[in-house]
Amino acid sequence: MLPERTRARLSLPALAAITVCAVSACSRNSEGIRPVVVESQQSSLKSRETPADRARPFVQLGQKYMELGKLELAQENLLKALKYDRQNVDAHTLLATLYDRIDDRTQALLHYHEAVQLAPKAGAENNNYGMYLCKLGQYAEARRYFDAAFADGFYSAKASAYTNAGTCELLGQGSLDLAEADFRKALAFEPNNAQALFQLANVLYKKNEFFKARAFVQRYDAVGQPSADALSLARDIELKLGHADAARDYAQRLRDQFPESEQARALQSPPSS
């Protein structure tokens, strides 16, 4: 996901410069004064630009090119942004995302780490870094950064962070109780978070709490995002509960909606006639 703080906007110095030029163009040079005053004002404004001001347009271009899938142009502009402002968190985050996309793990890790070093209390940066560490199999280390993301009182995407943390806990074969707590907290922030609903059903199934698992997989189904994994899990839950008819219904949906999936091929019972 791209950083929330990156916004397409002109800096105040740029707006001021545009205003000066517009006023100059509309006034008549009745006294024969050369436009050197305007140039002086522009030079003064430019001299007051911060590194972040100079980097901003390149960050915006980099983000736009990434959205268009033009990754080489995105990389070029984001590296230019860092030439002006080595501490630009958005540029580091976008570059990390870009390098992750092209599977350059060394550079992705470097820029994710740099972003979180520059913004150590920011929820988005900590969540991003935790996700990437989890992808690399560094589960215990990832938890540290998820915890930092939770602690950011201004972070608006805590449901995402808790869902990522719980998923990472499962991938690392960690505590089912901790994963369950993560998914429940995610749902407290976002009750229809499909990933949290599915993963909580999965955790409860693993804990042999089949009635509870059934309730959450049904809530997932009601959100309207069917998946082969969820239909397979729902079937298995119904089998554990001894509901053969309901299990057959889920199996049939799995065959109908995802006929080429591994889950459909793994079904042992033949299609109902």
Image (tube, rainbow, N blue to C red):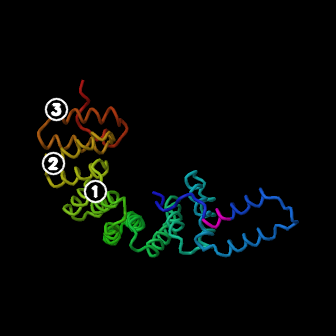
Considering depth in this image, is 245 or 47 the residue closer to the camera? 47
Q: Secondary structure at mark 3?
A: helix
Of labels 1 and 3, the one closer to you: 1
C-alpha span from label 3 to label 2: 19 Å
**Rendered view: 234 above or below 30:** above
Q: Residues within 10 Å of mark 2 (few under 14, many from 20)?
A: some
In this figure, which residue is indicated by the disc labeled 1?
A: 186
Q: CA distance from mark 1 to mark 2?
A: 17 Å
Reading the image, the residue beneath label 2 is: 212
Q: Give the mark nearer the N terminus: 3 vs 2.
A: 2
Residue underneath mark 3: 245
Which image quarter: residue 248? top left
Would you place residue 50 above or below residue 160 in this image? below
Residue lying farthest left? 242
Amino acid type indicated by mark 3: Asp
Q: Is residue 235 magenta?
A: no
| Mark 3 Cα-neighbour bin, 10 Å: few <14, some 14–19, many ≥20 | few
| Viewport quadrant of the N terminus | bottom left
The earlier-in-sequence mark between 1 and 2 is: 1
Of the residues shown, which amino acid type is indicated by label 1? Answer: Ala
